[in-house]
Amino acid sequence: GAVVSQHPSWVICKSGTSVKIECRSLDFQATTMFWYRQFPKQSLMLMATSNEGSKATYEQGVEKDKFLINHASLTLSTLTVTSAHPEDSSFYICSASRARGDTQYFGPGTRLTVL
Amino acid sequence: AQSVTQPDIHITVSEGASLELRCNYSYGATPYLFWYVQSPGQGLQLLLKYFSGDTLVQGIKGFEAEFKRSQSSFNLRKPSVHWSDAAEYFCAVAYTGGGNKLTFGTGTQLKVEL
């Protein structure tokens, strides 16, 4: 149990285009989902926290207009990187938890490369 | 703000040898502590967690960790390492009232020599 999937697993796009990444909790309902960014050989940095049915809470320094997060259902959250640029290339990881304060279960990540 | 330090960026051990990965945290109160493992192409997998109670925590795959409040540490141990344990290991901390937001350490890359 507690499986989280992400789609796509990797994506290459041109600079200036937008990319949507999906995060799904497959066998449980996730009240809260988190989005992280991981640079090569570095740790995970929390970008934002989303609660189902409400606006996401972004960490300091994360542009909310650039990284649009939607958590429309208890099993799906999406991250849209708008007008992507090469510096947005990274590994994006989501996690989901059943309730606030509960253990986070992580997806396998999405590798984004912006040309 | 809380922080997590993993002093060892890389560790190499021989298969069958014991392992200890270090983790220190900085936080005023007792945090929630986690160890995750990340293998290439796979998501982070929770090895174990400490919330309260017994300070020696048993996890999956034969791992254990000990919370030492006096040293602000939560070191991960395994008595006998297998080649399949080669991966990146992350220590993480969450704090009460923080909505289980995790702060991760920089990770330790484990290499296992056969």
Image (tube, rainbow, N blue to C red):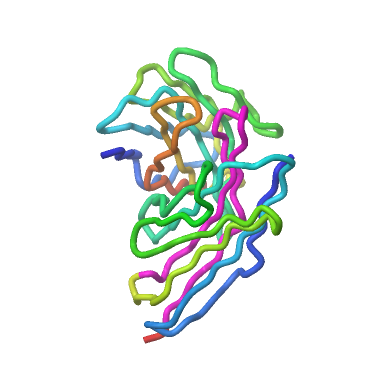
Q: Total of numbered circles in the picture? A: 0
Q: Residue at x 61, y 23 (%)?
A: A65
- Identify which residue, B69 or A99, lies in the foreground: B69
Left/right placement of residue B15 relative to residue B94 reads left
* Residue stretch rendered in magenta on the structure: B85-112
Where's residue A56, x and y in %?
55, 21
Left/right placement of residue B68 relative to residue A115 reads right
Q: Residue at x 60, y 65 (%)?
A: B22
Name above or below for residue B81 compared with residue A114: below
Q: Residue furthest front?
A: B54
Q: Residue furthest top?
A: A53
Query: Magenta segment: does it hold A56?
Result: no
Where's residue B69, x and y in %?
66, 53
Where's residue B41, x and y in %?
36, 56
Where's residue B77, x and y in %?
48, 67
Query: Magenta segment: does it hold B90?
Result: yes
Residue A88 sits in which quadrant? top right
- Identify which residue, B97 or A113, lies in the foreground: B97
